[in-house]
Amino acid sequence: MSNNKITGRIPSGLGNAAKLREIDLSRNLMVGEIPKELGKLKLLFNLKLNNNNLSGKVPTELGMLSELQEVDLSTNKLSGPPEQLEQCSKLLKLNLRNNRFSGNVPLQIGNLQSLENLDISENVLTGQLPLELGHLSKLEIFNISHNNFSGSIPPTFKEMISLTSVDMSYNQLEGSLPANKAFFEASVGNNKGLCGNNSIHGKGSLEKILSDDGKAMELEWGKRVKVVTGLANAISYMHHECCPCIVHRDISSKNVLLDEEYEAHLSDFGSARTVDPYSSNWTSFAGTFGYAAPEVRHVQLRVLTLEVIMGNHPRDLISSLPLRSSSSSPAVHHQILFRNVMDQRLSPPRNQIANQVVSIANTAFACLQANPQSRPTMKQVSDKLAASSPSLSVPLDLITLQQLFDPPTWTSCSHS
């Protein structure tokens, strides 16, 4: 019944249609309040009342509808945000845009763990953004623009790993943006105290730093060791400490952000998904099938590690390397010196830093082993890089790629 010229009030008798699963009265001329009797529709999963002239408060009874997946009340004259949404555990989309809602954002919205789309823009909401919103790990679209929010963005917002679109413009926010790519690309205009996407926030992406000669030279070997070690720890944590584990499907230099201390922050979790460790490695990613097997993260880590060492993408080097399953390898790899593929913009590393760089390179090549059982786990990689690196038995200037490519002995344990 949407897109008509229906006038009058929403009949309270609709609440007696016990088997009703969807109500779409959007884009009409309806007035009055939303009847609380709609809270009796226990099977209702879709409620669209947007683009009418409805007024008053949203009845708290709607918050008890456990089957609701989409609620669109946008473009009305409603006031007082719904304060009891705990039972709407299946809610995917909540659109309250362009109303007269005021006061603080209800903390209960942070409990809607299935929520993927939240739009509360164009209201008169005030106060600080609640920490609880940072618990919305599946949220992809987040719009709070054109309100009167103040204060800093809660630190929990960096944990919103699925965000792809953020609009925080036209508020009174201040402080820095979370280390999350979605916030770096967010619309944040007209927040006088907020460090927006036109301001320098940290050092920027690893990709941009490596592509700039001056910035790349500032990223000396000690800092590069710090970057790779930090990333290995982060990936190991996502894969071994999180339950279910988190698989980031685009671990690349463009999604690695460095702060002022050259600490690495992994951003852009838009394609990341949690994976049930007891299920198949095949899982759905944004409508397509994505492979979440261990091979994926080994490929990502080896490429990123070699890119940090070489200063550019290692596609040519990787494509030329032999597989360890081969009976023999081309003699050319015995002759190529490691120092000749390292970033030539920097002076060669020395002493303990040289030991660490070689250890990192050896680890990256270990991830190239053709046999998955010969590769280290992400936990082993993290532990190896965190440990003190042994002194080089051969001077750095004499180490060849073949020596790095020879597999190290890894502690025996299950591989992941």
Image: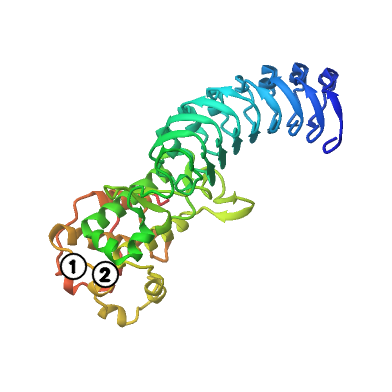
Q: Quadrant of residue 316?
A: bottom left
Residue identifier under label 2? 342
Looking at the image, which is closer to me, 73 or 75? 75
- Residue under label 1: 348
> Where is residue 49 shown, x and y percent of the image?
75, 30
Whether residues under marks 2 and 1 lie with C-beta atoms below 8 angstroms apart, the answer is yes
Q: Amino acid at mark 2?
A: Met
Q: Whole-percent x and y of residue 12?
A: 82, 18
Can residue 415 be seen here? The reply is: yes
Q: Quadrant of the N terminus?
A: top right
Residue 77: x and y in percent read 70, 26
Q: Which residue, as the protein is rendered here, is positioned at the far bottom?
A: 331
Q: Position of residue 227 (x, y in %)?
A: 30, 53
Against 59, is 304 above or below? below
Q: Is residue 103 left or right of residue 13?
A: left
Question: At x 54% / y 41%, what residue is drawn?
Answer: 167
Locate residue 365 relative to residue 130 in the image: left or right: left
Q: Amino acid at mark 1?
A: Pro
Relative side of 112 to 349, left or right:
right
